[in-house]
Image (cartoon, helix red, strand yellow):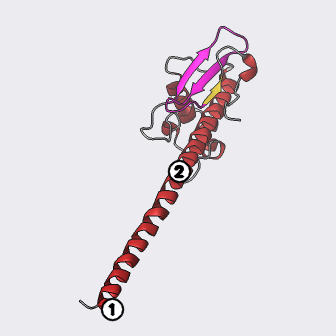
Amino acid sequence: MDLETRNKVITIVLGIVIVFLAYYLYRSIVDPYQEVLQEQEMTERVQHRMTLVRDALIEYRNEYGEFPPTDGGLDTLVNFLKTNERMVEQGSELFEERPPSVYNPDSLKFSPRSPHNEFQYTLNDTLRPQIYLLEDPDSDLAIGDLERTTLLNAPNWH
């Protein structure tokens, strides 16, 4: 192999190595950032869904004068959304989901974050006014408090 051929081969090999390393560097920067963006989007989706549950709890309280009990509370809420005439008619407008999700009373009590665990709802009916705590089991997101009435309907992410 003469010197000129050897230099061409080395140039081609080094060019391929440079292209591969440049691609690897690009992926090592972009992929983690994409994961952060996806996690932020999912957190916003969970916050929005929890806000919809809060709004539904307020509608339930306005209708019945109290929040649903702890035992079966979210099931009671879903049943209210499916049977109350006004909620059936206006539910999709009152509780509009973020695309690509659509309003479905049955899915309202579940987190949009995989594995789609049910939100945890606890009512403290020993205080006046009644207060509740709505928590996402897969994060530290919550609405309300079980001890302070000043946090009634207040999310912890603002």
Q: Please identify the quarter of the rendering in which residue 50 is found.
A: top right
In the image, farthest residue toward the front? 3
Q: Above or below — where is 11 with respect to 74?
A: below
What span is in magenta?
119-141
Amino acid of disc 1:
Glu
**Residue 10 percent location from the top left of the image:** 34, 81
Q: What residue do we see at 40% from left, 78% from top?
A: 15
- Name the disc covering residue 15, or none: none
Mark 2 Cα-neighbour bin, 10 Å: few <14, some 14–19, many ≥20: few
Q: What's the CA distance linking mark 1 and mark 2?
A: 50 Å
Label 1 or label 2, whichever comes before in sequence order: 1
**Residue 17 percent location from the top left of the image:** 38, 72
Question: Is residue 100 at least partly visible in the picture?
Answer: no
**Residue 75 percent location from the top left of the image:** 50, 27
Left or right relative to 142: residue 117: left
Left or right relative to 95: residue 28: left
Between 122 and 19, the one nearer to me in the picture: 19
Amino acid of disc 2:
Gln
Q: What residue do we see at 47% from left, 58% from top?
A: 28
- Name the disc covering residue 4, or none: 1
Q: What residue do we see at 49% from left, 39% from top?
A: 107
Left or right relative to 52: residue 27: left
Q: Please identify the quarter of the rendering in which residue 116 is found.
A: top left
Residue where numbered disc 2 is placed: 38
Left or right relative to 20: residue 81: right
Q: Is residue 137 magenta?
A: yes
